[in-house]
Amino acid sequence: TNLSEDEPVDWVSLNNGYLTTQPYHVSFDPSAVSNNLLAGFQDNSVWFTSSDDPKAPWRDQFGGDGTYSAIADGGKVQYVSAQFGRIYRLNVNEAGEDLSFTRVNPIASGFRFVTPFILDPNNDNIMYVPAGNSIWRNNNLDEIPLFSNASTLVNWIRLESSETPEGSAITSLDVSTYPVANRLYYGTNTGGIYRMDNAIVDSQEVVDLSTGKGLPQGFVNDINVDPSNDNRVIVTFSNYNTISLFYTEDAGETWTNISGNLEENADGSGNGPSVRSTAFFGGSQGFLGSLLQKVYAATSTGLYYTYGLRGENTRWYKENFRIGNAVADEVVTRKDGFIALAAHGNGLFSARFPVFN
């Protein structure tokens, strides 16, 4: 139809609830003083909110393809990152406004497009970040000079013993807190799983936890250590047609398939979802803990949960109709009952549930 410039044109929005935000990762203050959220979004930076109002505007904290993040020092510090391992430290006020900044990632090669990093849960001034097939550790992030846009070697050490086989890349990592702290678990894109005890000390021996253990040679997308028991760990393989979830209660000596009804077929084939991450909810100590501890699983068809891990008989149930079948990349939990979910394509969700132990 030919329309002259003088004829009015009525545009009608057809979005109708269409959402396109695509978070890779979500973090919150681990000290449980607030429900503030920090999240990195594909193509759209890292954003922060201090409000529970779903309509309140968020604050843009960074740029690029927002990836991993962390909140530290009682909310006074934010770590934000973009593609290929560019990590910055922001000192902020209560509103999230920058007071100072500096770049903190090490001078290293091999960073993945989405590079995971973690702050040591026992000391949030220590950071672990993988680059290629080895892990770097910073012993004191506070000493990195402010207002620099350059990678640095200040207090960074490459953990040489962490090196995985040539051609592999480290894709996930987690650190224990109780009863044994500073156990570093990590996994690779080729199915390798490793443990380094007392990882805050240099030149520690690494234990191979996967070779000959009957695990798939898939992409280890997530490692989740039970905060109440360092021997209990869940490993997530995100590949389709692969058994997704394995669990150990002896620090990786033996592994049990806990995928249960998340797989259509026992061998992982069929129409089961891709599983992206898991999170323990509540402690596992004592008789009540073993019964009431909840485990969440973020998958390509939404968020699931289970009470009790019963090997291949583990039953997973869908959580929350509002999340629906959104691709859930990451679920994180806190000891006070707070939970947050990054849903790729559907934004962020948070909730608070009672904790019984």
Image (cartoon, grey):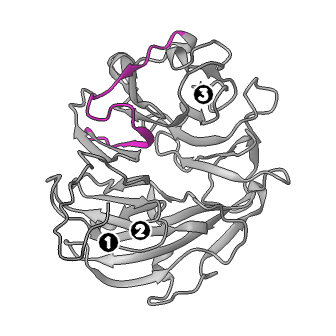
SS class of the residue under badge 2?
A: loop
Q: Quadrant of the C terminus?
A: top left
* Crowd rating for badge 1 (residues with CA inside 10 Å; few <14, some 14–19, many 20+): some
The residues colored magenta run: 313-337
Location of mark 1 (residue): 60
- Does residue 138 appear in the picture of this structure? no
Q: Is residue 311 left or right of residue 192?
A: left
What separation in Å lies between label 1 and label 2 (alpha carbons)?
Answer: 7 Å
Determine the residue positioned at 37% across, 54% down.
21
Element type at mark 1: strand
Cβ atoms under marks 1 and 2 closer than 8 Å: yes
Q: Which one is earlier in the sequence, the residue at label 1 or at label 2?
A: 2
Q: Which residue in the protein does label 2 denote? A: 45
Q: What whole-number distance in Å separates the C-alpha atoms at marks 1 and 3?
A: 34 Å
Tell me where residue 25 appears, x and y as whole percent: 44, 53
Image coordinates of residue 117 in percent, x first then y, are: 54, 59
Identify which amino acid the numbered label 1 is placed on.
Answer: Asp
Mark 3–mark 2 Cα distance, whole angstroms, equals 30 Å
Q: Circle 3 is placed at which residue position?
A: 244
Residue 356 image offset from top left, x and y in percent: 24, 26
